[in-house]
Structure formats: structure tokens, C-alpha cells
Image (cartoon, rainbow, N blue to C red):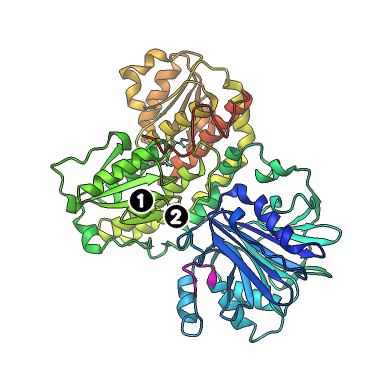
């Protein structure tokens, strides 16, 4: 996720802003930049490492903003790096999040303004430029512009001839740091934790003007106060947002990650999805087969998507573990689409499979988190899942974002192929848009998951069962547990238990079962009975209103239709996390594993 920093005070502004960019490095980035104000504006930005960014010494600068960028709109280039400026280089802005309606806003501006980047963010600088023709107050100008923006954003603005920094928050965090002789801003406290731990967290709708004489916060036109709190985090805890591990932080980031995957792509009422792909309607209609290639967690997201694609886009789908993929000669390359699902965009097995498909003349699509990655560049099209960087080795939020994005692809293809009516598409899109709230409900129940995890942490082995959409989630639940706790865990299709695995079931093998919408819960219930009668403790993830009758322990999954299994998966992530934590495992860096597997 991008990082924002800002400083206003009598200290060495250039040095302080440069250092705070270093503090934000942990979030992952592909370019960085600063804007320093000493009456006039000095902007320096470039792609690549912060160490290579020359932040000039501007002795009289009293105020500055900085940004680390993780690309979402446009490649990681110098031009796309933040800060962005207006036509006169007098307004500088940095932005986190996604401006959903930037294309419409840009169309209206383009005759009178010169754009230098491909980003959604740059519109903000030009809109402020226009507003400053109407008002002399930077705060008023930003307030007017924020009212035009749709989407999620944290913005910081500074402008020549104006005092201080104006910041605005909507669905993307921003925090003010208060020191005796200076005020800081940050997308998180890491930006300035080496200077102060007294902070005020801004709330959605807040717009704050920070000047030498203090700061004013307005929300909906009214002046508001935000409580000052003293946090006791050290730099390491601050990087993890106060969580002990990145993995837990990333589990908790899922509502926001899913929101970002949806942002600007969905019209729920009309049942329309816009993914900015170059697949023509004719090509989509003529498609005969989709071949999904992926590894690990991404493979399970692919299995989930295959169910949806076959059902709603009426297209044949095969899902291959990338290292097993061969393009079969008897397929028609012109009517086949290879979809590589890959968080990193660099996994060697998936890349090799993608090249095999491309080599056979097949169109390719990379569904990835990483703009500018090898697969994003090599595939004919790239579809970004927009999770923001994932630092924990175990994939968590990216699974939710992959499934969300692939669900949008399903609706897109279903509509193009006339396999899905607009009403059916609306129903799916409504369910998807409820996922962030549903995940939040699961996260709010974390303490009960922890208790259960601690109760069962010493079991011999763990089984996960599910059918249909519950099956990939069972596989993913088992993978998560085994990779971070080092316990034996296996996922099965419910119906397969009786074909062998039942022999392993004892009173010391808890069975976690997914029984939600889209999982053939009635049949899975038979499998729950099978293991129960062999003495296994059962833990149910269910949207059934009266689950206690069936399971030893149950977790309620909010009602979000076919997205329920991906929401249920959040319980499994928390379960794995707390089992591993109880055992003191190296959760963010499990033994023998790497985040990006670039060897075959
Ligand atoms: C598991 C995990 C791995 C990756 C796999 C593919 O938690 O992270 O199984 O999912 O290595 O990586 P990507 O998605 O980067 O291709």
C-alpha cells in the first residue's frame, strides 16, 4: 500500500521528510517523491529505491510532503510517481487509494489542463488548481475538490503561496502526529514515530489544515476535534500497525483490500463490470475454454473462480497447478484463454506455464497484485487485484482479493457472452459488495476463534472439509495452518473422506467444515456426522442460524450468497494464526518458505 508523510516545523524539513520516507519503506513501493515548500514548491520524485532519490536540501523549507508509491494506475515510472502537480507547478498532492471517477473528471479537465502521468491521482492537483481560481483558501479549495471525488483516498496537499498542508481522509487511513515544535502527518504512525507518539487519527470525511499556528479539522462543513492519544508502539510495532505480525495485520486489512478490488469497476444496479481489458466482445463470445494456471493459494483462488466461471459465464474451465501445465495439442488456441493467477506476478512455475500457453498462440491474462511484474508485462492483458503489498509469507488478503477480482471477471464474461442477465449480475455484484462488511464481522469475532485455536493447538492433525466452493477453501485453510504452524493439516472434498482419509480420523483430529451457501451444505453435513461418529471434534463454519445442534463449536458466516466461503476463510486464517502463535512459530517467515518463488 502506498505511504504518505508530511512535516511542518522549524527543523531540517528536507532531512526529516527524507527520513520518514525511509520509515515507510517497509510497506513496499516502486517509486517515491517529495514536495518541499519554502514559499515556492520543489518537487523531486522518481521510480526505484528511496536511497537513489535525491532529496535536495532546501534550507528555508518549513513544510513538506512525501510519498512511497505502489502502482495501481499506470506503470512504476518517474512520471507516475507522486507528488503530482498542477499545470503551473504550484500545487503538489500525494494520494493513497483509488479515485473511482477519475476518468470522468479527467475528461472534463483535459482541454484546459496538461496531464503528465497515467495516474488517477493527478486529477486532484488540477481540480485544486481550478478551485484556487475561485478561493484564496487552500482548505476551501480542497473541500470543494473532495466533494467531487468518489472512491477511497487519503490526500495531502501543499501549494506555493499558501500556508502549511491540507489533508483529507475517506476510507484510507491518515494520522496527525503532534510534537512540541512540529506537526507531522502519515498514512500510519511509522512515518514519524521517531519524533512523536502523540497522535490524532483522522476519521472518514475529515479535512484538516495544518499550519504553524496549529491545526483545524472540518467534517461536513463543521469544525471537529479528534482525540489526542499517546501510543506506546516502538518502530517495529508501528510498522505492523500495532499488530504482533504482518500476517495478522494483513488478515485485518481484508475489508479494505476487497473494497479496493471493487473500486470503480462495478455498477451493481445495472449489473455491469468494467475491467479495462482488451478482450473484444466477439472474442469473449467465441471463447471455448479458459485454462487457469497458478500455484498454492492462487491455485485455490483459481479453483473457486472455475466454479463461478462455469456456472455464470457458461465456459469450460480447467485449473492446472502451474508446474503440471501442458497446452494440449487438440485445443483450439484461438478460442482458449490462459489466465495466470499470481500474487507476485513472478512465480517461476506460473511464468513458465504462461509462456507455454503464449507459445501455443493462446491469448493470456495475468491476474496479479503486482503492476510491472514479469507476468503483468508478458501477458496480453493484466487485471490487478489491488491488495497492496503483502509482507507475511503466507498469503491472506490476496486470496480474498483474487477471488473478488475473479468474480468480477466472471460477471464481465458472463455478460459479454449473454450467459448472465443484468438481474443475475446485480445479485452477484450486490453479494460481492457486502463482502467487506461481512469480513469485518468475522474479524470482530477473533477472540472466540483464538480460544478455539488455543484449545485445539495440540491436536495430532487437522482436517478441513468442504464441497463445491467450500472445497478450495478447505484446501486453503489446511495450507495456511500447515505452513505457519508446521502441524499436519489436510483439506478434502467432503465426499472423499470415505474413500480413504476416514482411516485417520480419531478423537484427536479436529475437523473444520465449511457449510455455507454454494458448498452443498446438506451433503457436507453427512460427512460431519461421519467424522463425529468416529469421535472427531467438529468445528463448523456455517450460515445456518442454529448450528449448535450439529457442531461442537461453530462460527457464524454472514449471509453474502456465493461469497460466503471466502468470508468463512477468514475464520480459517485466524484459526491458523492463533494455533501458530500459541506455538511461538515464526509466523511471518515460516521455515523453508519464500514469499516469491522464482525457481522452478
Ligand atoms: C501460501 C502462499 C503460496 C503462494 C504461491 C503462489 O500462503 O503464499 O502458496 O500462493 O507460492 O504465489 P503467487 O501467487 O505469487 O504466484
C-alpha separation, residue under disc 2 versus residue under disc 1 = 10 Å
Report the image quarter containing ligand 1: top left
* Residue 202 in view: no
Magenta part of the chain: 116-122
Q: Quadrant of residue 65?
A: bottom right
Which percent across, then down, holds residue 581? 62, 28
Return the residue at label 1. 366
| Residue at image coords 55%, 49% | 255
* Residue 110 in view: yes
Which percent across, then down, holds residue 282? 21, 62
Classify 266 as above or below 533.
below
Q: Quadrant of residue 164?
A: bottom right
Using a 10 Å C-alpha cutoff, classify the residue at mark 2 as few (fewer than 14 neighbours), some (14 to 19) or many (20 or more): many
Report the side of 354 relative to 193 (left or right).
Answer: left
Which percent across, then down, holds residue 118? 46, 68
Outermost residue, right side = 180
- What type of secondary structure mainly makes up the magenta span? loop
129 vs 479, nearest the viewer: 129
Report the side of 543 relative to 22 (left or right).
Answer: left
Using a 10 Å C-alpha cutoff, classify the residue at mark 1 as few (fewer than 14 neighbours), some (14 to 19) or many (20 or more): many
Report the side of 66 relative to 491 (left or right).
Answer: right
Q: Quadrant of residue 408?
A: bottom left
Which percent across, then down, holds residue 595? 49, 38
In the image, is the residue at mark 1 within 8 Å of ligand 1 by its beta carbon? no
Return the residue at label 2. 371
Amino acid at each position: 500500500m502506498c505511504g504518505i508523510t508530511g512535516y511542518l516545523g522549524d527543523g531540517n524539513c528536507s532531512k526529516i521528510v527524507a527520513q520518514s520516507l525511509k520509515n515507510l519503506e517497509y510497506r513496499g513501493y516502486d517509486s517515491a517523491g517529495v514536495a518541499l515548500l519554502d514559499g515556492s514548491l520543489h518537487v523531486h520524485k522518481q521510480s526505484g529505491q528511496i536511497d537513489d532519490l535525491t532529496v535536495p536540501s532546501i534550507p528555508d523549507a518549513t513544510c513538506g510532503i512525501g510519498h512511497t508509491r505502489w502502482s495501481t494506475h499506470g506503470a512504476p515510472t518517474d512520471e507516475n510517481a507522486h507528488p503530482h502537480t498542477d499545470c503551473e507547478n504550484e500545487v503538489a498532492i500525494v494520494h493513497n487509494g483509488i479515485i473511482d471517477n477519475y476518468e470522468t473528471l479527467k475528461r472534463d479537465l483535459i482541454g484546459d489542463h496538461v496531464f503528465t502521468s497515467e495516474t488517477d491521482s493527478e486529477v486532484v492537483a488540477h481540480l485544486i488548481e481550478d478551485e484556487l481560481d475561485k478561493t484564496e483558501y487552500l482548505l476551501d479549495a480542497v473541500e470543494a475538490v473532495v466533494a467531487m471525488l468518489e472512491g477511497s483516498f487519503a490526500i495531502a496537499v501543499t501549494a506555493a503561496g499558501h500556508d502549511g498542508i491540507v489533508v483529507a481522509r475517506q476510507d484510507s487511513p491518515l494520522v496527525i502526529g503532534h510534537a512540541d515544535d512540529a506537526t507531522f502527518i502519515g498514512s500510519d504512525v511509522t512515518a514519524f514515530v521517531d519524533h512523536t507518539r502523540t497522535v490524532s487519527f483522522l476519521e472518514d470525511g475529515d479535512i484538516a489544515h495544518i499550519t504553524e499556528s496549529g491545526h483545524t479539522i472540518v467534517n461536513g462543513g463543521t469544525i471537529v476535534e479528534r482525540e489526542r492519544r499517546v501510543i506506546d508502539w516502538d518502530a517495529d510495532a508501528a510498522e505492523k500497525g500495532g499488530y504482533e505480525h504482518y500476517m495478522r495485520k494483513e488478515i485485518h486489512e481484508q475489508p479494505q483490500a476487497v473494497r479496493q478490488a471493487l473500486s470503480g469497476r462495478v455498477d451493481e444496479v445495472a449489473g455491469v463490470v468494467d475491467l479495462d481489458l482488451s478482450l473484444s466482445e466477439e472474442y469473449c463470445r467465441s471463447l471455448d475454454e479458459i485454462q487457469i494456471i497458478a500455484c498454492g493459494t492462487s491455485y485455490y483462488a483459481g479453483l473457486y473462480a472455475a466454479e463461478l466461471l462455469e456456472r455464470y459465464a457458461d465456459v469450460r474451465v480447467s485449473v492446472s497447478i502451474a508446474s503440471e501445465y501442458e497446452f494440449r495439442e487438440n485445443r483450439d488456441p484461438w478460442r482458449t484463454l490462459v489466465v495466470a493467477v499470481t500474487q507476485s506476478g513472478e512465480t517461476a512455475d506460473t511464468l513458465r506455464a504462461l509462456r507455454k500457453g503464449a507459445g501455443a498462440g493462446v491469448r493470456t491474462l495475468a491476474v496479479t497484485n503486482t503492476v510491472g511484474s514479469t507476468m503483468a508485462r508478458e501477458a496480453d492483458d493484466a487485471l490487478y487485484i489491488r491488495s497492496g503489498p503483502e509482507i507475511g509469507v503466507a498469503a491472506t488478503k490476496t486470496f480474498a482479493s483474487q477471488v473478488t477480482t475473479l468474480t468480477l471477471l466472471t460477471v464481465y464474461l458472463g455478460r459479454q457472452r449473454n450467459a448472465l442477465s443484468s438481474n443475475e449480475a446485480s445479485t452477484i455484484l450486490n453479494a460481492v459488495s457486502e463482502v467487506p462488511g461481512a469480513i469485518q464481522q468475522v474479524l470482530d469475532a477473533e477472540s472466540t476463534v483464538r480460544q478455539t485455536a488455543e484449545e485445539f493447538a495440540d491436536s495430532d492433525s487437522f482436517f478441513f472439509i468442504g464441497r463445491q466452493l467450500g472445497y478450495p477453501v478447505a484446501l486453503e485453510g489446511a495450507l495456511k495452518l500447515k505452513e505457519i504452524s508446521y502441524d499436519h493439516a489436510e483439506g478434502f472434498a467432503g465426499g472423499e473422506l470415505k474413500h480413504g482419509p476416514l482411516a485417520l480420523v480419531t478423537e484427536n483430529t479436529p475437523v473444520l467444515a465449511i457449510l455455507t451457501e454454494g458448498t452443498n451444505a446438506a451433503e457436507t453435513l453427512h460427512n460431519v456426522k461421519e467424522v463425529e461418529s468416529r469421535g472427531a471434534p467438529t468445528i463448523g463454519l456455517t450460515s445456518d442460524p442454529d448450528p449448535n445442534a450439529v457442531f461442537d463449536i461453530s462460527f457464524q458466516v454472514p449471509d453474502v450468497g456465493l461469497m460466503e466461503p471466502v468470508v468463512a476463510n477468514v475464520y480459517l486464517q485466524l484459526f491458523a494464526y492463533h494455533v501458530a502463535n500459541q506455538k511461538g512459530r515464526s509466523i511471518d517467515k515460516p521455515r523453508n518458505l519464500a514469499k516469491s518463488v522464482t525457481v522452478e
